[in-house]
Image (cartoon, rainbow, N blue to C red):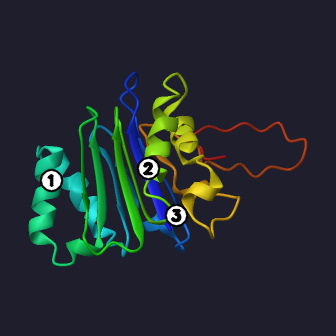
Amino acid sequence: MTFSLIGRCEKTNMVGVAISSSSISVASRCPWVRAGVGAASTQNVTDPSLGKLMLDYLEKGLEVTEVIDKIIKQEKNIEYRQLLLIDNKGNTSQHTGSKILGISGLEKGSNCLAAGNMLKSEMVPKAMVDNFNNNPNVHLAERLLLALNVQIGQISEKAEKIFDASGLTVLPGCIDTQTHFREPGSTDTGDLHSGS
């Protein structure tokens, strides 16, 4: 089971992806975001290179529908793939292949697109889009997480009650990963350039 939503904030033009899956390491393979360009998700028998390729084509000036059409024509195993794409203007396009595993669903909303596979119901993406669009005044990252907050029973009979949010990616943004090791009580100061 995998389900994701790509979305854009109309106020900030931020784009992002939220994804959850029963598949190991989904966050390292499926969500793709590029500041000023757009967001993509590639899922179901994943080919991670397709996420980067979608954003590369988008950055070169192709429209979202042209990007998906081009990938469909050149990818030999496309019928096993589920692709979602949004640009920084909110335009979306998608592909759901004919050989997707289990029950799949897709729903387009205002500035968002949701899809899933191996679901209990094809209505899961609609619930995700509703959750996203019903929260226009919260930060995009929170809206994306709210989109994943669908009823457990809607997702899968085997779904657990805890979702791994490691598949949340939002840009533009800044996360300070600088770590300062100091003795307890030390008053030493450092900055980004000193690294201390």
| Residue type marked 1 | Val
Residue 94 appears at what percent x and percent y?
Answer: 25, 53
Residue type pointed to by label 3: Lys
Residue plotted at (83% across, 36% down): 187
Q: Which residue is mark 3?
A: 120
Query: In the image, 153: left or right of 186?
Result: left
Distance from disc 2 to disc 3, alpha carbons, whole Å, reads 11 Å
Query: What secondary structure is marked by label 1?
Result: helix
Looking at the image, residue 129 sits to the left or right of residue 107; the answer is: right
Q: Is residue 154 rendered to the left or right of residue 9?
A: right
Q: Name the element at disc 3.
A: loop
Q: Residues within 10 Å of mark 1 (few under 14, many from 20)?
A: many
Query: In the figure, residue 113 lies in which quadrant?
Result: top left
Q: Which mark is residue 67?
A: 1
Q: Nearer the viewer, mark 2 or mark 3?
A: 3
Decide which of 190, 33 is in the foreground and name it: 33
Q: Quadrant of residue 194?
A: top right
Residue found at x 33% / y 72%: 100
Asked if the residue at tag 1 contacts the one at tag 3, i.e. Cβ–Cβ closer than 8 Å, the answer is: no
Closer to the eye: label 3 or 1: 3
Q: Earlier in the sequence, mark 3 or mark 1?
A: 1
Inter-mark Cα distance, 3 to 1? 30 Å
The picture places residue 85, in percent across and down from the top left corner, at 28, 49
Q: Earlier in the sequence, mark 2 or mark 3?
A: 3
Q: Secondary structure at mark 2?
A: helix
The relative height of residue 126 versus residue 12 in the rendered view (above or below) is below
Q: Look at mark 2 in the image and give the residue it sits on.
A: 125
Contact flag, marks 2 and 3 (Cβ < 8 Å): no
Residue 60's place in the image compared with 72, above or below, is above
Q: Residue at x 56, y 43 (%)?
A: 145
- Position of residue 41 relative to residue 10, above or below, is below
Q: Residue 174: x, y in percent?
A: 50, 39
